[in-house]
Image: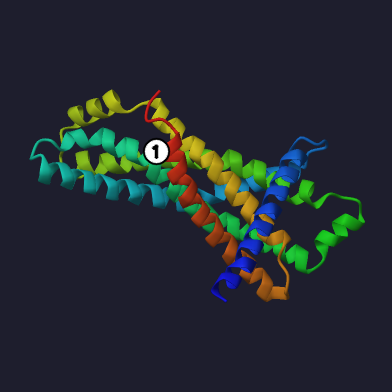
Amino acid sequence: MEKQTWIPFFGNFFCELGQVYDLAVRGFRAIFQKPFEKKNFWQQLEEVGVNSLPVVSLTAAFGGLVFGLQAYLAFHRYIGPGSESQGGPIIAVGLCRELIPILVGLMVAGRVGSAMAAEIGTMKITEQVDALFSLGANPVKYLVAPRILASMIMVPCLTLYGDVIGIFGGYTYNVLLMKVNKTLYVQNTLKYFEMWDISVGLIKALVFGLVIAIVGCWQGMTAEGGAEGVGRATTKSVVVASITILILNFFLSKVLPATL
């Protein structure tokens, strides 16, 4: 009996995986089809990027402060007083390669991915998506493609912005609050920190943006069951996107080289 219960689970999993893949392929194709939905695209750029700045600012700032705090304590405790300035490059590399891309991805998944699922899900429940079909319009081209492209552009931009805020947060705690030697801190950071470290984070952010948009749109397009169904789709979009981001982060960290 236990073996039989796993069969529907894996069947549904691969069925949904196929639906996500199909939606992603159709969405990418629609991006290059003319005419492109410029109005929706600009709206999504604002929604994904500009409107996410406050939450990204707070997340990156306190992420940098906490990371700077832990780096300071580690060097002070295990290497000795006076070695805290060596934490600069560790803070910068750790933030840009790992912490900031993940935090930005999770924040955008919670704020934007859920909104995508709710908006498209409501349109699906109220038969507005079917109305687009009836009018001869392509819902994927009109609804999905602008969101995919906007997310793939703005999530890396938000990550780059978060990198700056996070690094400044680490600098603030170590240099301004704990009086670590400013010159040594900056010199060590510039000596060991590379542009490739930023590039790794941006590559991850590009993938995370794609995941957020596709999962949110897929959950919205498959929503059913009235208002309750929209709620389920919204919740599931955040959970699925967040888990996928954490899983992909490990594999991307493993595949992408430490340095070029």
> Is residue 92 left or right of 151 when viewed as pictured?
left
Quarter of the figure with residue 4: bottom right
Q: Secondary structure at mark 1?
A: helix
Which image quarter holds the N terminus? bottom right
- What type is the residue that disc 1 sits on? Arg
Q: Say which of 21 and 168 sits in front.
A: 21
Quadrant where the image shows the C terminus: top left
Q: Residue at x 66, y 75 (%)?
A: 228
Q: Is residue 135 above or below residue 156?
A: below
Q: Is residue 129 left or right of residue 85?
A: right
For this orientation, the residue located farthest to the right is 135
* Residue at 77% from the left image edge and 49% from the top image edge: 140
* Count of numbered circles on the image: 1
Instruction: Choose between 164 and 126: the one closer to the eye.
Output: 126
Question: What colouring does the structure picture have?
Answer: rainbow
Residue at 69% over, 61% down: 220
Identify whether 255 is placed above or below 190: below
Residue that lies at the very extreme toward the left in this rendered image? 81
Q: Position of residue 231 (x, y in %)?
A: 63, 71
Q: Is residue 159 above or below residue 238?
A: above
Return the residue at label 1.
Answer: 97
Residue 12, position as x, y percentages in the image: 66, 63
User: Visible in this render: residue 183?
Assistant: yes
For label 1, the crowd category at 10 Å Cα-Cα, with few meaning under 14, some 14 to 19 and many 20 or more, is: many
Residue 197: percent from left, percent from top: 39, 31
Residue 139: percent from left, percent from top = 80, 52
Name the residue: 43% across, 50% down: 103
